[in-house]
Amino acid sequence: MAAQLIDGKLVAKTVRTALTAEVMQLKARGIVPGLAAVLVGENPASVIYVRNKRKACAEVGIVSTQRDLPATASQMELLNVIGELNDDPRINGILVQLPLPKGINPDAITDAISPAKDVDGLHPYNTGRLTRGDSLFVPCTPLGCMELLDHYKLPIEGRRAAIIGRSNLVGKPAALLLMHRHATITVCHSRTQGIDAICREADIIVVAMGKAKFLTANMVKPGAVVIDVGINRLPDGSLAGDVDYGPVAERAGWITPVPGGVGPMTIAMLLSNTVVSAKRAHGLL
C-alpha cells in the first residue's frame, strides 16, 4: 500500500492564509511587520531564493526590503549593514542569505544579528535556549517539519525518531524539537554504525543528509513517517531528495515529496517567525 502524501504546498498555503489575516489585524493597529534580506554577491541560486522570499512576504502583507552588497564586500561592511538593521525599528527580521563569499565568516555574521530579529533561529542565544525549549526563534526548516507532522495529526509522543544529519540548520534543532515533544531520538551521521538498523526501528525518519536517494526502502519500517529535507540536482537536471522516493513510498505510511514537501514550509515558517517578532516587539507576546 502506497504511503499517504504529506503535501507541503497545501500546508504552507494554509499557514500563509492565516498569516495574511493576522497581518491585516496588526496593520489595523498600526503594526507593520518588516523583513530585511541581505544579499552579498550575485550567486544565481541566492538571488532566486531571496526573490522568492520577498514575493512570499508581499503575498501575506509583510514589508520586505533588500540590501545588496557586492561579492567584494568586506566582513566589516556586512557587519555595519547588520548593525543598521538591528537599530531600525521598522525591521522585525533580518535574513542574511547564505552562502557568503570567501573571506566572510558566517558565524560572525550570525552572531551579529540581534537575537530578537534572528528569524532564521541561528544566533547562539536562540540555539542555546532551544535546548531548554523556550527559544525566541527556531530554524525555519525543522520548524516546518514539525508543522507538517502537526497538520496531519501524526503522533510524536512516545515514538522513536531517527534524524539523519546533524547540521546546525536542520538535524540538531529537529532532534531537540522532537525530544521536547517526548519522542525518543537517535541522531545519525556519516560516522554512525548500523544506520540501516537504527532507521528500521524508527516511527519517524527525518532525512537531511544532502545525498540523493540515501534512504532506501530496506531502511524503512513499514508504516513509518518519512520527512525528506534534502534537495539534490541529478546529472540529468532533475531534482531528487535524500529519499529514494518511489520504493520508499511503497513501504512508508506517510512521506513528503521533493519538491513540494518541506521546501514550501521553510518559507512559510520564515514569514511566521517575522510576524511573531513584530508582535513581540510591540508587547503582544
Image (cartoon, rainbow, N blue to C red):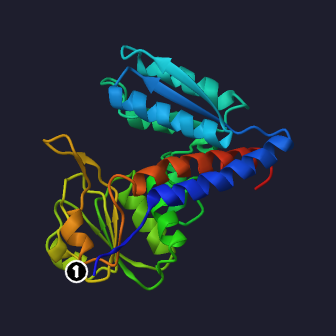
Residue 3: x and y in percent read: 32, 75
Q: Residues within 10 Å of mark 1 (few under 14, many from 20)?
A: some
Circle 1 sits on which residue?
A: 200
Residue 137: x and y in percent read: 57, 52
Q: Residue at x 63, y 23 (%)?
A: 84
* SS at badge 1: helix
Q: Residue at x 21, y 66 (%)?
A: 246
Relative to 156, residue 187 above or below: above
Tell which of 71 and 207 is nearer to you. Answer: 207
Q: Residue at x 55, y 58 (%)?
A: 129
Residue 45: x and y in percent read: 35, 31
Residue 236: x and y in percent read: 14, 42
**Is 152 placed left or right of 184 in the picture?**
right
**Is 214 placed left or right of 53 in the picture?**
left
Q: Residue at x 47, y 81 (%)?
A: 155
Tell which of 132 and 190 is nearer to you. Answer: 190
| Residue type at tag 1 | Arg
Relative to 108, residue 218 above or below: below
Q: Quadrant of residue 141?
A: bottom left
**Is 69 placed left or right of 228 in the picture?**
right
Quadrant occupied by the N terminus: bottom left
Relative to 148, residue 276 above or below: above
Quadrant occupied by the C terminus: bottom right
Residue 111 visible within the image: yes
Tell which of 67 and 61 is nearer to you. Answer: 61
